[in-house]
Amino acid sequence: MIQKTGIGYDIHRLVEGRTLFLGGVEIPYVKGLLGHSDADVLIHAICDAMLGAAGESDIGEKFPDTDPKYENIRSTELLKMIVHLLEQRGWRINNIDAIIIAEEPKLMPFKKQISSNLAKIMHINEELVSIKGKTNEGLGEIGQKQAIASFAVVTLIKEG
Ligand code: MG
């Protein structure tokens, strides 16, 4: 059995006039994340962790933000493409552990929905997807509600 672990990180700016998506779930809030895609910071961190574990570069290289094809794309679509790529390479997801760092909104009511949504997209049991929410204790840009960041660790396994 081969086992590999990857880490992913992402941050996006919070702005008015955008819908907030975290883990593919629409979260009611006065602002949303700014980006070329829907700027789903959690999915981007998870994608990079998966690609890192598989030794497959990163999402910036796979889906360049200069490519109009990916403009306003839902990040769930990017995740589906990466899941497909890893499945083709024989990888299975052993588990995912992720943190969302956001001063607002409160994420507790959405954590279960987020992990269940991600598990469905990744064809795994939702108990294998751990999502944690934290504030930044009022510190820095995240603490001042100007941005949301996310860290993710993914372990992949395959026969071999
Ligand atoms: Mg991003």
Image (cartoon, rainbow, N blue to C red):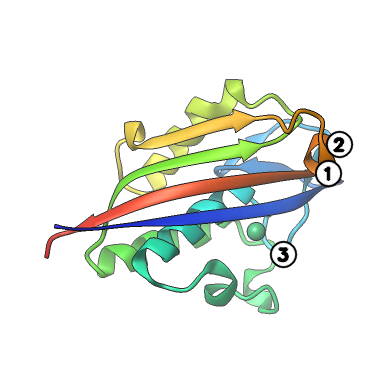
What SS does tag 1 mark? helix
Q: Which residue is mark 3?
A: 36
Amino acid type shown at disc 2 = Gln
Q: Quadrant of ligand 1?
A: bottom right
Which is more N-terminal, label 3 or label 1? 3
Given residues 128 and 124, the one toward you in this image is 128
Going by the picture, which residue comes out furthest to the top?
A: 109
Left or right placement of residue 80 versus residue 108 in this view: left
Amino acid type shown at disc 3 = His
The residue drawn where x is 49% and y is 52% is 46
The residue drawn where x is 56% and y is 76% is 61
Residue 79 seen by the camera: no
Q: Which quarter of the image is occupied by the C terminus?
A: bottom left
Q: Are marks 1 and 2 in contact (CB under 8 Å)?
A: yes
- State yes or no: Cβ of the residue under disc 1 lies below 8 Å from any atom of ligand 1: no
Q: Which residue is mark 2?
A: 144
What SS does tag 2 mark? loop
**Label of residue 141 in the image:** 1
Q: How many marks?
A: 3
Q: Which quarter of the image is occupied by the N terminus?
A: bottom left
The residue drawn where x is 63% and y is 50% is 40
Q: Are marks 2 and 3 in contact (CB under 8 Å)?
A: no
